Image (spheres, rainbow, N blue to C red):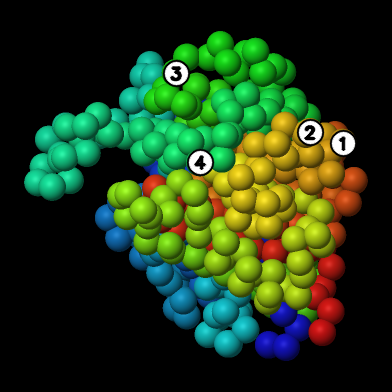
Amino acid sequence: MTGGTAIAGLGMTELGRVYGRSPRRLAADAVRLAAADAGLALGDLDGLLVSHGLGGSPGIELADTLGLRDLRLLSQLNAFGATAGAMVSYAAMSVLSGAATTVACVFADAPLKPEQPAGAAYHRDAREWYGFGGMTAALGLRSVNAFYALAAQRHMARYGTTSEQLGAIAVSTREWAARNPLAQLREPITIADHQASRWVAEPLHLLDCCLVSNGAVAVIVTGADRARDLARPPVHIWGWGQGHPGHRKERGSGFGLATGAAASGAAAMRMAGIAPSDVEVCQLYDCYTYTVLVSLEDYGFCAKGEGGAFAASGALGPGGSLPTNTGGGQLSAYYMWGMTPLSEAVVQARGDGGERQAPSSEVILVSGNGGILDHHCTLIVSPRAKER
């Protein structure tokens, strides 16, 4: 392959409080939708990458559900929220190397149950806390929310970041969601609403935290030359990178102050041949408002410690200088791990955003954050083929 790679198909099931389908069935539906979107038959796929969470042996079982035979590439990946970007980069490398020609990448989840609160979806049984790992539980750090609160608190203590600045991210994201008919939450909110929402783990309010959603999203990666002849405009993949800082949550570490976005962003931009100033739209992993703020800093869109002021300036919302999470992100639209920012990047690159379409979307940065700031993946995509 010499013409680069592109995303040729996007498949999205119903998202949100969608009941009655297992993650595997949702994943199969998303792959079928992505293939149809690209104008391909399922038999045209010779690669399948599956995000973890489907149970059993998800790759081979999903392939069997779809009737896929003689695949040249089949694997399960797990870098948590960074998985989507990693899958796309591995698919692109496989296409470029000739290991496969047409690779579906899919994420599916169904944690929500009827008549149960969203907070119960990721409840961890207390019996899982044992040994040295139980020390953090004894201190009250018993959830992902608590660890991200610790990270946000450290950023606040070092740089003077405020809760109101985090609230500005929640407000701008909801402004975008109001323009997205697929978003779960579309009612406008204010900084006052953010401040009045209940504490989840101080300093994180409820409106600092992402949604919980059922559903599935899939994309299809193929050669750019081939993608030009398919049903939808290709979304060209210019660059990718990963970063896994390995910060221990201890005194003197970089935990909460710096993330894998610094390394993965630099690698992706170097491959794409761009600088932060060239990026026109950002789709950032927003499991919390804090992760948007710290990612903006680590990508170089503002100086370290200035993410709060940058967000409060209005730069991220409609009419701002750096449209960010134009579909409403995971805070207001839907939570499909790294497929949330990736799917919106495809929508924007194709010009399908409708009322939320950014004024210019020639260079789009997509981020994925996984674990407790353990993993990061960055993609640079564009409706244009990369100049060589």
Q: Secondary structure at mark 4?
A: helix
The image shows residue 344 at horizontal and vertical percentages of: 69, 47
Q: Secondary structure at mark 2?
A: loop
Q: Amino acid at mark 2?
A: Gly
Q: Which residue is mark 4?
A: 158
Q: Is residue 273 left or right of residue 65?
A: right
Residue at point 84%, 50% (across, down): 351
Q: Is residue 347 above or below residue 214?
A: below
Q: Which mark, by number, is residue 314? A: 2
Q: Quadrant of residue 365?
A: bottom right
Q: Is residue 114 above or below residue 39?
A: above
Labels 1 and 3 touching (C-beta < 8 A): no
Q: Which residue is mark 3?
A: 199
| Residue 307 showing in the rendered view | yes
The image shows residue 382 at horizontal and vertical percentages of: 78, 63
Distance from label 1 to label 3 (Cα)?
A: 30 Å
Q: Is residue 300 above or below residue 118?
A: below
Mark 3, mark 4: which one is toward the viewer? Answer: 4
Q: Secondary structure at mark 1?
A: loop
Q: Which mark, by number, is residue 319? A: 1
Mark 2, mark 4: which one is toward the viewer? Answer: 4
Q: Amino acid at mark 4?
A: Arg
> Between residues 67 and 342, which one lies in front from this camera angle?
342
Residue at point 50%, 41% (across, down): 158
Distance from label 2 to label 3 (Cα)?
A: 24 Å
